[in-house]
Image (tube, rainbow, N blue to C red):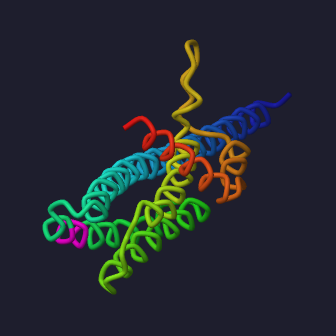
Amino acid sequence: MEENTVTLIVGLAGIIATLLVAVIGFYYTHKSQANSFREQLYSRQIDLISKLFHYHGRFKIFSTLIIENHFKEEALEDIRDILRDHSIAKEEAGAIFPTELYEQLRDVSDAMSIFMERQENDILLSREDQFVFNSADVKFALLSRSLLGVDELSIGNIQLTSSWKSFKRVKNIDGGYFDRFVRAKMDVDTNNT
C-alpha cells in the first residue's frame, strides 16, 4: 500500500471519528437541555399545585364559616381574596398543567364561583352547597397526586413521575363517585359531632 493511501485512510478515519464525537456531543447536550426543561416544568407544577391546595383549604374553612354564620363578613372578604388569587393561579395552570388536570381545576373554580354567586344573591347556603366544591376538589387532589407520582413511592424505589395510565385511570373516574364519597364522609363527620 502506498504512503499516500495510508495517510488518506488515517485522515478519513480521523474526520469520521471527529464527526461521530460531535454528533454524540450534540445529542447529549440536547438531551440534557430537555431534561432541564422537564425538571423546571415539574418544579413549577409542584409549586402551583401546593399553592392551589392551600387556596382550596382556605376556601373550605371560610365557606364553612359563612354557612354556619360565624364571622360572615370577614369570611366573605377572605373568600373574595382567595377567588382573586385562585383565578391568577388558574391562568398560570393553563400553561403548565396537562389538559385533564386543568379541566378539573376549572371545575373546582366554577364550584367556588357558584358558591359565591349563591351567597351574593342571598340564597340560604347549607352544607349541601359545599358538596359540589368538595367533590371537584377531591378529584383535583387525586389527579394532582397521580400527576406528581406521590402515591407511587415505595420502600426500595422512589418514582418521581407518574405513569400516563395511572393518571388517565383517575381522570376517567365519574364525578358522581366523588360526590358520593364526600357526602358519605360529611355524614360520618356530622354523626360524630
The residue nearer to you, when weighing 193 against 27, is 193
Q: Quadrant of the N terminus?
A: top right
Residue 140: x, y in percent?
52, 54
Residue 79 sits inside the magenta stretch: yes
| 172 on left or right of 119 | right
Residue 9 visible (yes or no)? yes
**Residue occupying image coordinates x 59% and y 65%:** 99
Q: Above or below — where is 106 with respect to 118? A: above
Tell me the quarter of the image containing the C terminus.
top left
- Check the image and report above or below for 125 versus 193: below
Question: Looking at this view, is 10 or 25 the one in front?
Answer: 25
Q: Which residues are magenta?
A: 76-81
Above or below, 131 relative to 47: below
Q: Main secondary structure of the magenta part?
A: helix
What residue is drawn where x is 45% and y is 39%? 191
The residue positioned farthest toward the bottom in the image shown: 121
